[in-house]
Amino acid sequence: MFLIVPPDTATITCAQIPTPDVLPPLVYSNGVPSGRCKIMGTVIPVRTDAFDICGGEIEYLWEKTDSCGRSISYSQVLFVDPAPEAVWIDAPSDMTLPCGQTVAADYMPLLFYSNGAPVGSFCEIAGSVLPTRSDMIVESEGTTTFTWEITDDCGRPLAHSQVFTLSPPDLPAWINPPGDRTEESCSGFDFDALPPLFF
């Protein structure tokens, strides 16, 4: 039999995937402490990898056939979790622009994303993407919306949007509007005069 065997199943993260050269040996013994009937030794497993960045399995299989043709075996399956999902880096917030200010027509900002795994590692999901742009502007007011979207290799979507709101002009106000006054009908005041008022 094998001595001190690992759990037959275990779950590991993407970052915990053992390198291909990790082949842990198991010790086997028939329990006889000494003498010509003692059978004891170590076995290196056969490793089968069936995983990618989206998860999967690693199987270790230890097998031994003794000199009498009797076989023993033990297997362990490691279930590999998918790589962590990416998040946006410094995703911009919505903004309100003052009247007269607009978003430049050629403004198409890149947005970067990462799942925090070391650069160049097997588990890394990182990159950048250009947005789609939607302008909904009438005269001098409205919105400009940027939308960034990706779907990683595991089919997991990631999206963010930023809305620029273009403020309308301030409401006009009268300049020096005259106040109410009382005139006698015979005072000579020209009631037909219509003085202009500016705003």
Image (spheres, helix red, strand yellow):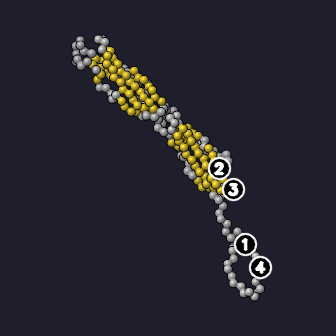
For the residues labelled 2 and 1, the Cα–Cα distance comes to: 37 Å
The mark that comes first in sequence, 2 or 1, is: 2
The image position of residue 179, as x and y in percent, is 67, 78
Q: Residues within 10 Å of mark 1 (few under 14, many from 20)?
A: few
**Rendered residue at 35%/19% (across/down):** 63
In this figure, which residue is indicated by the disc labeled 1? Answer: 197
Q: Quadrant of the C terminus?
A: bottom right
Q: Is residue 47 above or below residue 84?
A: above
For the residues labelled 2 and 3, the Cα–Cα distance comes to: 12 Å
In this figure, which residue is indicated by the disc labeled 3? Answer: 139
Kind of residue at badge 2: Asp
Q: Is residue 16 left or right of residue 130?
A: left
The image position of residue 21, as x and y in percent, is 42, 23
Kind of residue at badge 4: Asp
**Rendered residue at 31%/12% (across/down):** 69
Query: Camera-side residue: 39 or 156?
Result: 156
The mark that comes first in sequence, 2 or 4, is: 2
**Rendered residue at 22%/13% (across/down):** 35
**Rendered residue at 28%/23% (across/down):** 3
Could you say which disc has been placed on residue 135 in the image? 2
Q: Is residue 142 above or below residue 70?
A: below
The image position of residue 192, as x and y in percent, is 77, 79
Secondary structure under the numbered disc 3 in the rendered image: loop
For residue 101, what is the image quadrant?
bottom right
Observer able to see residue 98: no
